[in-house]
Amino acid sequence: MPRKLENVLPRQIVALAARVVAENKAIGRRIVLAESCTGGLVAAALTEIAGSSAVLDRAFVTYSNEAKQQCLGVSEDIIDAFGAVSVACVYAMANGALARCDADVAVAISGIAGPDGGTEDKPVGTVVFARMVRGEDKPFAEHRVFAESTRAGVRLQATLCALELLLP
């Protein structure tokens, strides 16, 4: 008899997503996501949790530069000057996501999961994050290079990092 599938995603992601949902629900905080290299994995993690609709307002998966511009209002000048994998871009993604809904906090993610696409300045595993809280003047941005050697590993680590940024 086949084993019953309980979760689609790894346990560590589901456990962290459960904390994000519970802790944000407890303070009445709503979330919006702007994902690129994670391709919706952060939203998928949150929706693994029953009751996540009380917390997750919406998620934008803007994988292409055109989608970042059209869906989130990221300026072509930002992408031309700094690239899609830059603090400037994820800051604009988070800002655009918040501007398009009534959520309280936005997290944006963009990166190079590989195996191709890396450069000397931005190697495979480079991921940038931004968190913006409505009404706060101090947005947070982070640039990380994950040492994971696989596309799946980079995306897993980026998802975990984004979930941590969603904790109050």
Image (spheres, rainbow, N blue to C red):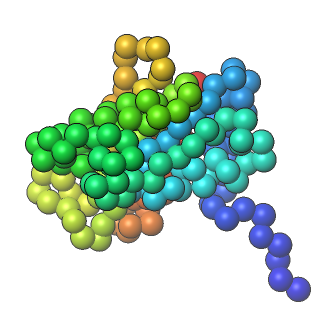
Residue 9 position in % (x across, y down): 63, 61
Where residue 29 sits, quadrant-wise, is top right
Judge left or right: residue 128 versus residue 16. left
Q: Is residue 139 above or below residue 34?
A: above
Residue at position x 24%, y 49% from top?
84
Answer with left or right where residue 39 lies relative to residue 90.
right
Residue 126 higher or lower than 163, as above or below: below
The residue lying toward the viewer, choosing from 142 and 96, is 96
Instruction: Name the residue at the bottom extreme.
Output: 1
Residue lying at 82% horizontally and 77% vertically, measured from the top left = 3
- Relative side of 40 to 65, left or right: right
Q: Position of residue 46 (x, y in %)?
A: 64, 47
Q: Position of residue 23 (x, y in %)?
A: 68, 29
Indicate the quadrant where residue 44 lies. Answer: bottom right
Q: Residue at x 67, y 65 (%)?
A: 8
Q: How many marks?
A: 0
Evaluate whether residue 145 shows in this view: no
Identify which residue, 114 or 27, lies in the foreground: 27
In the rendered view of the protein, which quadrant contains the N terminus? bottom right
**Vertically, is 102 above or below 124?**
above
Q: Is residue 44 left or right of residue 162?
A: right
**Residue 25 can be seen in this image:** yes
Q: Residue at x 34, y 66 (%)?
A: 149
